[in-house]
Image: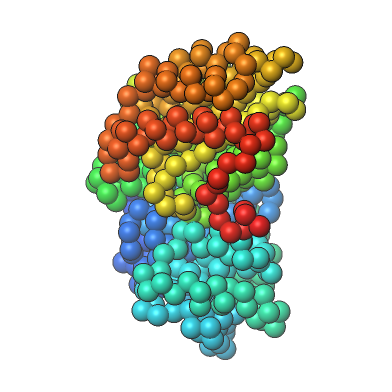
């Protein structure tokens, strides 16, 4: 492999200004940089964990040759992930003649701001929505605002403002639309194919030039912290004060953003975000669409990656159980060597995965269910949107021609120290007629598979009962029985 050139600084655009920084800590957040170093204090600090949306900004990046702007949480977005990006804060929205941006003006006219603390975050989320969907439906508006909390409960006024932005925008020159061609050219000029290394010793971070370079970096630094979307690692810093150095930032490595399908298997690069994967997964495996829509807010989905959700090995990660039920496999890479394993075998124990030092998740491969196969996934939380899972059940079923269970895979999160299959329950179902009596008999085997814990999200008794009932619900859905569902008014319509 040719020698990789290196540079010792990051480069990005902040609003309209080119920024070069060579003195940046691995755990420095965009929020602190904006507020403390640039005095751009429209971006607020609220929860410091990506939940409230007061810190929302837009980050533009080149994806597939196109400039894409996404709302992100500045409080958990590390500076090292911004190389080659365009950061847009609320201060950039005003026009040159001092007038408000259409999104801001709509918030004023429809009284969408009360105390005002959360307002810049709402404005930036609506701005991102407006650029993607100039005439958004109520469902799209609510989806865009899942990650923005208003403690003054001003949502109805904000909804009215959001509905009006399409009309306001028709008579305005939007700065990001006017600048798009120039910004694209400036970001293209930043793409120099170099490795970025900032800092010295252990107090440093690396941005690999490409996937091969990532493999080389991790071989040399097998204990480094790999940071993709930072929706989890960000909280290690803001909540637990953990040292993540040396850090390796991989969010903008093009080779990890591949998404393709071949012979009924969808291959997802480790850097593909939930937002990037949504269209393909929701179309080809419809049950995954509603699940992805409930993973954090829009800002979290714009940053978080499916590969990262798998690699961190959390027992309550939302994507591993359904992917296990679908029979997914992983490509793991160390240096030039790759190996493929079943996803269910990747999780060994709490905090331990089948991954050697210096080895990383390169891609996940997800089989698409055939016609006649049944698949469902259900997430149980205290509140519907932007909440951590109490338990999540995923079910894949193939029936024989005589109506008996030919194959079944059932996987849960939140029920054990790792995402785990219900092997005893599956064994009780295979070869049996797919009837309510069979399902109820199999439900008794859950105690052989799981001993759930009690924590702030649910008691062990609740989890055990919910897990059983999700299997019964899956049976009712597959047999056409009408089951009561907890849905939003848009899903119901």
- Identify whether 240 is placed above or below 41: above
Q: Is residue 239 left or right of residue 58?
A: left
Residue occupying image coordinates x 37% and y 30%: 464
Question: Which of 119 and 99 lies nearest the eye of the viewer?
Answer: 119
Q: Is residue 348 visible?
A: no
* Image quadrant in which you'd find residue 249: top left
Compared across the picture, whether 288 is left or right of 31 comes to right
Quarter occupied by residue 210: top right
- Residue 93 is situated, as x and y percent measured from the top left of the image, at 54, 76
Q: Quadrant of the C terminus?
A: bottom right
Residue 239, percent across and down?
A: 27, 49
Q: Is residue 338 above or below residue 285?
A: above
Note whether residue 50 is visible.
yes
| Residue at (55% x, 46% y) in the render | 485
The furthest residue to the left: 241
Colour mode of the rendering: rainbow
Q: Quadrant of residue 380?
A: top left
* Residue shown at the point (55%, 72%) measured from the top left: 159
In the drawing, does residue 117 fall left or right of residue 17?
Answer: left
Q: So how many labels did they put on this image?
A: 0
Of 43 and 406, which appears nearest the observer?
406
Residue in the picture at 62% in, 58% down: 490
Look at the picture and state if 170 lies above or below 291. Answer: below
**In the picture, which quadrant includes the N terminus?**
top right
Q: Residue furthest front?
A: 437
Where does residue 347 sit, x and y in percent of width and height? Answer: 42, 22
- Residue 468 horizontal/vertical position (percent): 45, 29
Q: Nearer the viewer, residue 188 or 245?
A: 245
């Amino acid at each position: 492999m040719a020698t990789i050139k290196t540079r010792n600084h990051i480069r990005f655009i902040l609003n309209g200004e080119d920024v070069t920084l060579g003195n940046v800590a691995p755990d420095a957040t965009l929020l602190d940089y904006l507020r403390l170093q640039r005095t751009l204090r429209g971006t607020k600090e609220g929860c410091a964990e990506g939940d409230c949306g007061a810190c929302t900004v837009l980050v533009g990046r080149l994806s597939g040759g196109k400039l894409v702007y996404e709302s992100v949480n500045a409080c958990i977005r590390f500076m090292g992930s911004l190389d080659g990006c365009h950061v847009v804060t609320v201060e950039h929205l005003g026009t040159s003649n001092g007038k408000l941006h259409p999104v801001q003006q709509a918030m004023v006219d429809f009284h969408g701001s009360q105390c005002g603390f959360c307002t810049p975050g709402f404005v930036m989320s609506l701005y991102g929505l407006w650029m993607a969907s100039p005439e958004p439906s109520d469902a799209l508006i609510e989806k865009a605002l899942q990650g923005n909390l208003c403690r003054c409960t001003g949502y109805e006024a904000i909804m009215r403002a959001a509905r009006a932005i399409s009309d306001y925008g028709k008579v305005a020159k939007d700065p990001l639309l006017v600048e798009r061609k120039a910004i694209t050219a400036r970001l293209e000029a930043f793409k120099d194919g170099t490795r970025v290394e900032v800092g010295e010793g252990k107090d440093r971070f690396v941005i690999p030039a490409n996937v091969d370079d990532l493999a080389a970096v991790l071989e040399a630094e097998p204990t480094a912290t790999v940071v993709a979307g930072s929706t989890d690692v960000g909280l290690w810093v803001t909540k637990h004060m953990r040292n993540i150095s040396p850090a390796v930032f991989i969010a903008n490595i093009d080779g990890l953003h591949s998404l393709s399908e071949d012979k009924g298997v969808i291959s997802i690069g480790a850097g593909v975000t939930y937002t990037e994967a949504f269209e393909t997964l929701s179309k080809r495996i419809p049950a995954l669409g509603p699940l992805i829509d409930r993973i954090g807010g829009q800002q979290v989905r714009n940053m978080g990656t499916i590969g990262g959700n798998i690699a961190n090995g959390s027992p309550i990660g939302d994507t591993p159980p359904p992917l296990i039920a679908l029979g997914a496999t992983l490509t793991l890479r160390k240096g030039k060597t790759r190996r493929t394993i079943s996803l269910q075998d990747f999780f060994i124990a709490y905090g331990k995965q089948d991954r050697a030092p210096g080895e990383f998740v390169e891609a996940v491969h997800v089989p698409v269910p055939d016609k006649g196969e049944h698949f469902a996934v259900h997430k149980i939380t205290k509140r519907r949107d932007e909440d951590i899972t109490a338990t999540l059940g995923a079910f894949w079923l193939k029936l024989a021609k005589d109506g008996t269970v030919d194959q079944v895979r059932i996987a849960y999160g939140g029920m054990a120290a790792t995402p785990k299959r219900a092997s005893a329950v599956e064994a009780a179902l295979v070869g049996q007629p797919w009837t309510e009596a069979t399902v109820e008999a199999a439900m008794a085997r859950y105690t052989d598979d799981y001993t759930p814990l009690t924590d702030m999200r649910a008691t062990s008794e609740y989890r055990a009962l919910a897990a059983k009932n999700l299997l019964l619900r899956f049976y009712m859905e597959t047999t056409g029985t009408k089951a009561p569902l907890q849905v939003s008014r848009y899903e119901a319509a």
